[in-house]
């Protein structure tokens, strides 16, 4: 089993990561984990024009640039580190400068949320509805990305499963998407019936991570067309940004 989820990911990164990883892992199952902030996160990474352009692309025309060879990337990083000026070293290594970078990062995230709110106000949509309106740009992008992920997974001989970590209106929207594209949908209601989250924190607790892992495993076992010839089912998980690795 490979866990490809990174904290801060949303459909933008997940679709690319799945595209790059399918030939590497050759999974039988791909598990997409949606969390409640995934829609707003899109606005921190992409402009409205970039999201619209992605939505307009037919599934078979969506492409991503080839990944840079890690050895080449590391060599380039070493070269840049060795060539740093004294001022550049200070900016990158002093705690005060790291704090400023963190503040800039926080500002960019806030600006992304503010941009999303401004866009929807211009469309007559209240900012509180960004994550719960299926007609919002973020949801339309996510739906197209999920359709694409199912498309590339099936072309690689894998089955896409959706495992949402959300409730209410978002869960309804995801169920509708799953129905439209015939995507397997894992019932994760059990997550919300016990101490599955850290106190005052949306991340999964160790108990929650185990519950999620058990729910996914049970669904795969129930849906598998045939016994796996492997000691453990080949599975790839994307989008598990708010859970510990089971």
Image (spheres, helix red, strand yellow):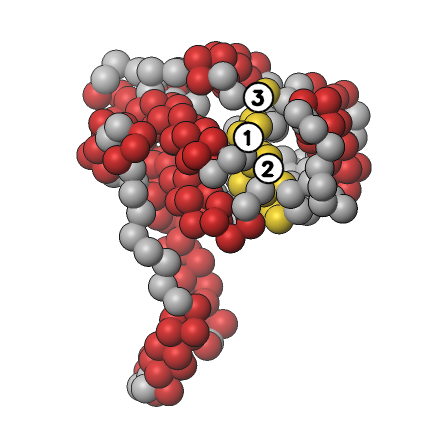
Other residues around mark 3 within 10 Å, as few (<14) / some (14–19) / many (≥20): some
Which mark is in front, 1 or 3? 1
- Helix or strand or loop: what does disc 1 sit on? strand
Q: Is residue 184 above or below residue 237?
A: above
Residue positioned 52% across, 21% down in the render: 183
Q: Is residue 66 above or below residue 235?
A: below
Measured as percent of width and height from the top left, residue 140 is found at: 34, 23
Q: Earlier in the sequence, mark 1 or mark 3?
A: 1
Other residues around mark 1 within 10 Å, as few (<14) / some (14–19) / many (≥20): many
Residue positioned 34% across, 43% down in the render: 45
Residues 201 and 33: in front is 33
Mark 2 highlights which residue? 28
Other residues around mark 2 within 10 Å, as few (<14) / some (14–19) / many (≥20): many
Q: Is residue 92 above or below residue 225?
A: below
Q: Earlier in the sequence, mark 1 or mark 2?
A: 2
Q: Earlier in the sequence, mark 2 or mark 3?
A: 2
Residue positioned 38% across, 71% down in the render: 73
Mark 3 highlights which residue? 184
- Helix or strand or loop: what does disc 2 sit on? loop
- Asked whether the residues under the numbered discs 1 and 3 touch, taking CB atoms below 8 Å apart as contact, a structural biologist would say yes
Which mark is in front, 2 or 3? 2
From mark 1 to mark 2, how far is it between C-alphas?
6 Å
Q: Quadrant of residue 196?
A: top right
Residue positioned 43% across, 34% down in the render: 155
Residue 159 bears which disc, if any?
1
- Asked whether the residues under the numbered discs 1 and 2 touch, taking CB atoms below 8 Å apart as contact, a structural biologist would say yes
Name the image quarter holding the C terminus: top right
**What count of labels does the image hold?**
3
């Amino acid at each position: 089993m490979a866990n490809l989820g990174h904290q801060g990911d949303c459909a933008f990164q997940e679709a690319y990561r799945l595209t790059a990883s399918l030939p590497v892992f050759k999974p039988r199952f791909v598990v997409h984990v949606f969390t409640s902030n995934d829609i707003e996160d899109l606005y921190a990474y992409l402009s409205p024009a970039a999201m619209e352009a992605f939505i307009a692309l037919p599934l078979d025309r969506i492409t991503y640039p080839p990944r840079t060879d890690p050895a080449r990337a590391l060599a380039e990083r070493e070269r840049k580190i060795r060539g740093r000026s004294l001022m550049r070293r200070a900016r990158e290594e002093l705690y005060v400068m790291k704090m400023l970078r963190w503040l800039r990062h926080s500002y960019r995230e806030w600006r992304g949320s503010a941009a999303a709110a401004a866009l929807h106000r211009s469309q007559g949509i209240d900012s509180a509805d960004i994550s719960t309106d299926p007609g919002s740009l973020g949801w339309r992008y996510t739906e197209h990305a999920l359709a694409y992920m199912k498309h590339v997974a099936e072309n690689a001989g894998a089955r896409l499963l959706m495992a949402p970590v959300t409730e209410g209106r978002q869960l309804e929207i995801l169920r509708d998407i799953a129905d439209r594209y015939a995507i397997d949908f894992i019932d994760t209601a059990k997550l919300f019936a016990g101490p599955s989250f850290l106190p005052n924190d949306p991340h999964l607790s160790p108990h929650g991570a185990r519950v999620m892992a058990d729910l996914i495993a049970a669904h795969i076992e129930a849906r598998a067309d045939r016994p796996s010839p492997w000691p453990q089912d080949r599975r790839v998980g994307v989008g598990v940004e708010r859970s510990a690795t089971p």
